[in-house]
Amino acid sequence: MSKIPLTIRGAEKLREELHRLKHEDRPRVIQAIAEAREHGDLKENAEYHAAREQQSFIEGRIQEIEGKLSNAQIIDPAAVQAAPKIVFGATVALEDTDTEETVTYQIVGEDEADIKQHLISVNSPIARALIGKEEGDEAVVQAPGGERTYEIVEVRYE
């Protein structure tokens, strides 16, 4: 399996979720299953089936996170020596050449992406258009609404 790029912050969030799942959610569901068993007939016990389903989800998520962390390539964006080129971890200020609006994104791993926090996946169309470019370059992005052109205003690693 190939390495999964993650920032330090992204890896820490996954570790926190893993800890919560193992030490809070899993014991709570095990307790719920035990309580539901005490209610008798398991065939028609909705609480039991719901708790088992939740347990299955939790165990699956634990395995998924453990797999991602074991295959993670954790990258500290502040230590990246790629400037002035844009690579994973870069924080990039872009200006839309049509609207002249400026927006800033950080290129992060797939699991860290959150557009509301201006974190875009390294596999997103915008990030793919930016990788390898420098300040002053233009990047053409194939967006659902059509082609967009952005000027790269600033590149920093923090």
Image (tube, rainbow, N blue to C red):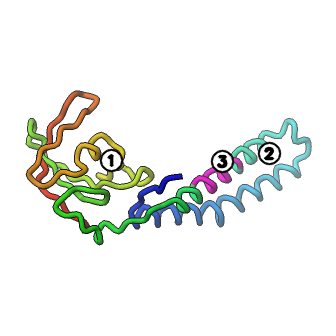
Which residue is depicted at the point 36% across and 45% down? 123
15 to 39, vertically: above or below: below
Q: Main secondary structure of the magenta part?
A: helix
Q: Which residues are magenta?
A: 56-64
Residue 24's x, y, as percent? 64, 64
Which residue is situated farthest in the front direction here? 1
Q: Which residue is mark 1?
A: 115
* Residue beneath disc 2: 48
How far apart in space, not on screen, are marks 3 and 1 (Cα)?
25 Å
Give the residue type that dot 2 points to: Tyr
Label 3 neighbourhood size at 10 Å, few (<14), some (14-19), many (20+)?
Answer: few
- Number of the front mark, 3 or 2: 3
Give the camera-side residue of 99 and 152: 152
Q: Where is residue 69 shown, x and y percent of the image?
A: 53, 61
**Relative to the observer, which residue lies in front, 54 or 71?**
71
Counting residues from the start of the chain, the first of labels 3 and 2 encountered is 2
Which labelled disc corresponds to residue 57? Answer: 3
Residue 148: in magenta span: no
Residue reaching furthest to the bottom? 79
Q: Label 1 sits on what residue type?
A: Ile
Left or right placement of residue 42 versus residue 110 in this view: right
Q: Image point 87% across, 42% down: which residue?
A: 42
The answer to which of 30 and 118 lies nearer the viewer is 118
Q: CA distance from mark 1 to mark 2?
A: 37 Å
- Residue drawn 24% across and 58% down? 91
Mark 1 or mark 2: which comes first in sequence?
A: 2
Q: Nearer the viewer, residue 7 or 57?
A: 7
